[in-house]
Image (cartoon, rainbow, N blue to C red):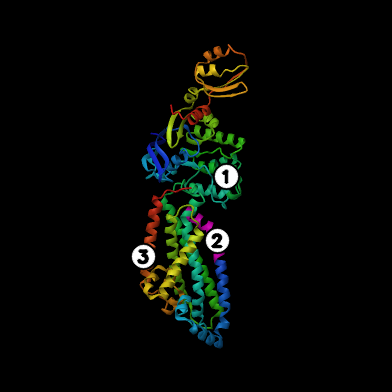
Amino acid sequence: MNLYVFEIRRQLKSLLVWFGVLALVLLLFMSFFPSMADSDMAQLTRIKLNAIPPAVREALGITRTTDFSDILQYFAYTAQYILMAASIYAAILGVSALVKEEAEGTIEFLYAQPVSRTGIAAMKLLAIFTLLLLFNLLLFAVSALLFEIFRHPGYEYLPMLIAMFKGMLGGQAVFLVVGFALSSVLSRFSNPGPIGLGLFFLTYLLGNIALINRDLEWLKYLSPYHFVQPSTILADGGAIQPPYPLVMLAIVVVAVVVAFWRYRNKDLMV
Amino acid sequence: MYVIETIGLTKHYGQNRGIENVDLTVNEGEFFGFIGPNGAGKSTTIRTLLNFIYPTSGRAMILGMDCITETTRIKSVTGYVPGEINYYRNTSVRDLLYYAASFHGQVDRLYMKKICDQFELEMVKPIGTLSLGNKKKVAIAQALVNKPRLLILDEPANGLDPLMQSRLFSVLTDVNQDGTTVFLSSHNLTEVQRFCHRVAIIREGSIIEVSQVDTLVKTSSRRIIVQSRENLEPILHQLGVKEIRVENLRFSFSYGGSIDQLIKTLARYTIDDLRIEDPSLEDRFLHYYEGGDTH
């Protein structure tokens, strides 16, 4: 448990920086809501959005939720950018988890202690998942606060907000464990930041190709971001479309097995 | 039971050689020196013992426990000081030592404090701000927190000033006298000669000699320096000296034969100065590395 606590303490500052930036983005977007909700503006936005070609609208995540005078729909549009950033954060957390100890040479301290490799991997995975959960809880709290400020009196938002955050956390968890699996495979010379970014944008690109090109629709299973887009979850009444939950579970299981197996057997170089 | 035992321990890095058939035994209570130049395989051997890397073939055991399957148990009774100290940069010395201690359950806090005082550690400073020497001290302190039965040190004196080196060896001698086996890889042959009971010499991945330090030194050739007014080279060659260097009729050479015969031969010439140096581990070491002879 000491390793778990140490990891969390060590990474708390970077979590707060990511959270601070995203909280500001949320605040900025949501502060536009009152003017977007104005009926003339809503009308104008709808017309303009309908003029965008459907494929581009799909790529922008504004196919099914285009009523920006509705605070949940407006938030769902905003939250997709939050999801992007949070997925990148999750991917970097995952990629850094194991390989960073080798890259920085700190593994020579850690693995000289009476702790097994499985123990190290398990505690690290638990720690980064805790950090991700905390990160999402903080964002959820800020979002709920903003809803309280900007919603129309009596507007019910909580169940859908929770559903969107649950979905987004699921998507981020997929990036976290895939990054974690990569972390067990990568050499110590790898740079976790760019690899985390690459992991997100590569899968995001594949997901968008799937949306635009029907022949390559199967590519959508490779983009966790698209599994849990907040606007889709909102349009589907709070649920993640099947078979995505199963796909996510399968990816998580495979990635965790690969990570633990590989970490047990690799040479830890410094 | 040996504290360290390796049997045919071999590690290849792809096509590159790491270590080859290393057979080594270290007894309980020994102060054991492991010497060899950079790249000879010292760190590879140590990292295999501590399961950082897996051997290609062969076996290694510490205190009778297998270095792969029982590595966690091994580490509860072992302390390790790596060659390069790269600890968590933003963590303070105190936090790092407590973190190390937390892996061992119950540790003797008084003993920890004594070690910290002995090394004059600056407890509140982040590791990243410390000088190389101070980082080394932290590493040695953390390796001692659990009062290990075996202490493995990879070049511990590197980066320490002479005062701290002497303090380090005084601590190592103390812990050794208290029963801890010390396994020390080093370049500093004077230190090894002074403190170690036995020594293993590794070259290009293979152990080429394991011996008592005293025996090794005694069998080494002496280095002799003669200042003369005549050319002594032909006669020196007749005496069978080795590694001869001549500069302005100053002859420096290595000699393993009878001193009596040497003096009687030199007495026939005019000699301005004669210096016979004690045989040292360094001479023996250089003999292996420069001479290329393993016997």
In the foreground, B196 or A198: A198
Q: Are marks 2 and 1 on the same chain?
A: no
Categorize mark 2 by other alpha carbons within 10 Å: few (<14), some (14-19), many (20+).
few
Q: Which mark is residue A250?
A: 3
Where is residue A145 shown, x and y percent of the image?
55, 74
Q: Mark 1 belongs to which subunit? A: B
Q: Amino acid at mark 1?
A: Lys
- Residue behind mark 2: A14
User: Is A91 drawn above or below residue A36 in the view shown?
Assistant: above
Q: Which residue range is magenta in the image?
A: A1-18
Identify the residue shown where x is 56% and y is 33%.
B170
Helix, strand or loop for disc 3: helix
Identify the residue shown where x is 52% and y is 75%.
A78
Q: Amino acid at mark 2?
A: Ser
Q: Are marks 3 and 1 on the same chain?
A: no
Magenta stretch secondary structure, dominant: helix
B181 left or right of B66 in image: right
- Residue behind mark 1: B135
User: What separation in Å lies between label 3 and label 1 (alpha carbons)?
Assistant: 45 Å
Where is residue A195 shown, x and y percent of the image?
48, 60
- Mark 2–mark 1 CB contact (< 8 Å): no
**Quarter occupied by residue B225:** top right
